[in-house]
Amino acid sequence: MKRRSYLTFLSLAFLALSLWACSSEGKDKQTLLAEKKKALVTLQQEIAALEREVGAGAEEKTQTRKLVELLPLAKTEFLHFIEVQGTVESDQNINVMPEMQGVIKSVLVKEGQNVSAGQTIAILDQSLLQTQIAELETRLELANTLFEKRQNLWKQNIGSEIEYLQAKNQKESLEKNILALKTQMGKAVVTAPISGVIDAVFAKQGEIGSPMSPMVRIVNLSQVTVTAEVSEAYLADVNKGDEVTVSMPAMNVEQKEKISFVSQAINPTNRTFTIQIDINNKDGNFKPNAVTTVKINDFTQKDAVVVPTNVVQLGTDGNKFLYIAEKQGSEMLAKKVVVETGISYDGQTLIKSGLTGSEQVIVKGYNEVITGDVLRL
């Protein structure tokens, strides 16, 4: 309408100028030129005013459109997880201590070194034991000689039985003492009870080794166990053999495993039950005593309608709603839809009713629109 008025105005203006020009034929040319210039300035001002009005109308129309961003929905699988913290444990994480006390003669391993079960780790000084054994072996030679003589005499019914028995006892006693010292001397060699990696070396050459002080720590990480505490509210949802996702953020590691143990008793202190997950840790990524996250899938729904949690709003009537975009003619209009929601996880909410899964949900600018607003994408 405004453009039509503008064209009509121009036609009338040109007609007026023509009539005025005809009536001005008698005037001198200088006066006529001045009048036409003045009329032209007036006309230009009126044209500019009309252009501003037309432009303002178009801008106003553009400004009434609400700028939004849409998310086309599609049915998908919705998964909900319980997330609990766990701790990595290893039953092959041991401190090795000598079985006897003595001066450490040598330490044969270094931190980070791989060792096999039975491999020598350290040796204690055996010189005192060797001296004692040598002394007893000398006494044993004499005891054997005496025993043999007493035995021969006894066979000939010469001498007393008590002398024979005393010689025999002396010989056997020395043999037992020598055997005990040799066994003890064998304990001076400290060996690895398991295969693994030397995680720490505590002993130094020249120090006193003791059964009360560890010499080294050996860790075998090929098999570890993650232990976690789960709220009793999920007792019916967690079973032995269920697949879980175990991750250790510090190492940026994540892998799927199965629950190997579920306790049947509830801890009365924190109302939780214990689960264990055995992990094949051949790469050594899971470290003993490290904190892990265990994700347990407790709910799954296929062909689910899911929307971002933040687009769901709560009305004053207590109903939950969101806005979708509907095409009407050449325009996209906002429409409020009341929905029934289910559980949420990781920023996504399950929609039980209100949506079919084929809509376009307004995900940006949703709090700036009302039903019927024209949208600008």
Image (cartoon, rainbow, N blue to C red):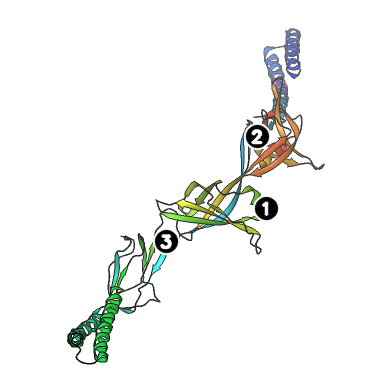
Pointers 3 and 2 in contact (C-beta within 8 Å): no
Q: Position of residue 250 (x, y in %)?
A: 48, 54
Badge number at residue 208 = none
Earlier residue among tags 1 and 2: 1
- Name the residue carrying label 1: 233
Viewer-nearest residue: 194 or 174: 174
Circle on res. 92: 3
Q: Position of residue 364 (x, y in %)?
A: 65, 37
Q: In this view of the protein, which residue sits in the foreground, 26 or 173?
A: 173
Name the mark on residue 304.
2
Which residues, given as a range, are shown in magenta?
43-47
Say what secondary structure mark 1 lies in. Answer: helix
Task: Say which amino acid is labelled 3.
Answer: Gln
Question: Does the magenta portion include 190?
Answer: no
Left or right position of 328 against 118: right
Q: Is residue 241 above or below residue 17?
A: below
Residue at (76%, 31%) from the top-left corner? 371
- Camera sees residue 167: yes
